[in-house]
Image (cartoon, rainbow, N blue to C red):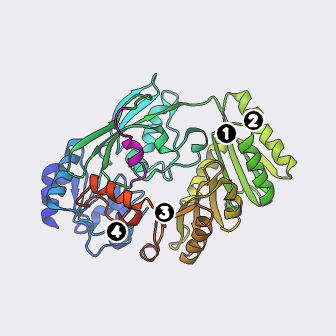
Amino acid sequence: MKAIASDLASIVGEENAVCLWENIELSQQKGIQQAIANEKPQSVYACENVPSCIVYPRTQEQLAAVIATAHRNNWRVLPCGSGSKLSWGGLAKNIDVVVSTERINQLIEHAVGDLTITVEAGMKFSRLQAILADSRQFLALDPAKPELATIGGIVATADTGSWRQRYGGVRDQLLGITFVRADGQIAKAGGRVVKNVAGYDLMKLFTGSYGTLGIISQVTFRVYPLQEASGTVVLTGMAEAVSQAADILRGSALTPTQADLLSIKLVSGLGLGKGLGLIARFQSIGESVKEQSNRLLEVGQKLGLDGVIYSDGDEATLWQRLRECMHSFPTKSVITCKIGVLPTAAVEILTQVELGVIHISSGLGILQLDSQSQVLEVRDRIQANNGFLTILEAPVTVKQQVDVWGYTDNALPLMRRIKEQFDSKNILSPGRFVGGI
């Protein structure tokens, strides 16, 4: 263990190679050490040995040198940013070293007129949004933990939420990436302009790959202008009426930028009323926001639903609390799952769980479940309707006993061939992805 740490310290400097398990007092520092030390190593990695160290390259070149060294020595690497999503996905196996990109975090270029921005992967999402806000722009993603999440981690886990109603997901906004291959070589795909079709679309392949194909070091996104006004309508009431309201909204000329269905307990916990909920955000010029909000409110009234319009600070707080509710853990036994269902089946699923939010158009959502048996029961019901349920966060015992990804279709051989092409030695994030990839 000391030999690995010593070799890597010669690349990144001793101050950037932390032997966490021998220097547990370092866990009090902010960053990935603390994220890992909050749990026993096995609960994060589920391996008999503990990683020798955590290294923090400060440049893309240092990152490449670290990975090249790991490749030569067959060391297994767990890439991460700030560590806010280390517990997502499958359990990593027999990790030798953790490599964090959070110190590779510089702004490369912000082309304000072209509506694009290029940053290093370790930049925090909140900092990126602050940079864009100075030019009245924003990146239309809403990750689980915006204050902690790094840009590379967001791409690697495809972490976004209800902004996809208007802007699509991570892969739809990603224009280019630079990444370090498993052998330590630096590669690029895409570019810095919106209309770029050269080469293979590796951006989509890397989105949601959980660091199994390479380590993202730099990304280029398309960004959008901040809108003049914003308003959020919340409708609550009986499940059938909420379902009808969602159907009407989907088929109408209204253009919400965010729109979700909420479970009964979530509605109650947020103090929004009783029953299921429909939450929709409109952003445009002031007159348009007012008109669209009132039209949806009228739809709710005709269906017997209670309706409220939120604006200004109350609106921002509502969306923040919604995100926090779905990614907080009142007990250690809580199991957080990502699901995909037919949008028309979303209400049926939400009536059978306590905490859940599902996007009205894509059918993607987050559920909080209480037990392993409930996970299997809900998964069976979703898969019977051509959907999926993936476990994001759960006690390690659950992940050891239940297939985290629950994938049953026929693309696994193709996924394995792709993994072989990108990482023939299987040193990057072994075990985190579908089928133990």
Report, in whole angstroms, how far the alpha carbon at label 2 lies from the one at label 1: 8 Å
* Label 4 Cα crowd, 10 Å radius (few <14 / some 14-19 / many 20+): many
Could you tell which of marks 3 and 4 lies nearer the N-terminus? 4
Q: Which residue is mark 2?
A: 292
Q: Amino acid at mark 1?
A: Pro
Q: Which label is found at residue 409?
A: 3
Q: Secondary structure at mark 4?
A: helix
Callout 1–callout 3 Cβ contact below 8 Å: no
Residue stretch in magenta? 198-209
Q: Amino acid at mark 2?
A: Gln
* Label 2 Cα crowd, 10 Å radius (few <14 / some 14-19 / many 20+): many
Q: Amino acid at mark 4?
A: Tyr
The answer, for residue 226, to whether it is visible in the render is yes
Judge from the rendering whether residue 203 lies leftward or rightward of residue 18; answer left or right: right
- Please state which of the two labelled residues, at mark 3 or mark 4, is closer to the viewer: 3
- Please state which of the two labelled residues, at mark 3 or mark 2, is closer to the viewer: 3
Q: In the figure, residue 226 lies in which quadrant?
A: top right
Q: Quadrant of the N terminus?
A: bottom left
Judge from the rendering whether residue 290 lies leftward or rightward of residue 165; answer left or right: right
Instruction: Identify which residue, 14 or 393, lies in the foreground.
Output: 393
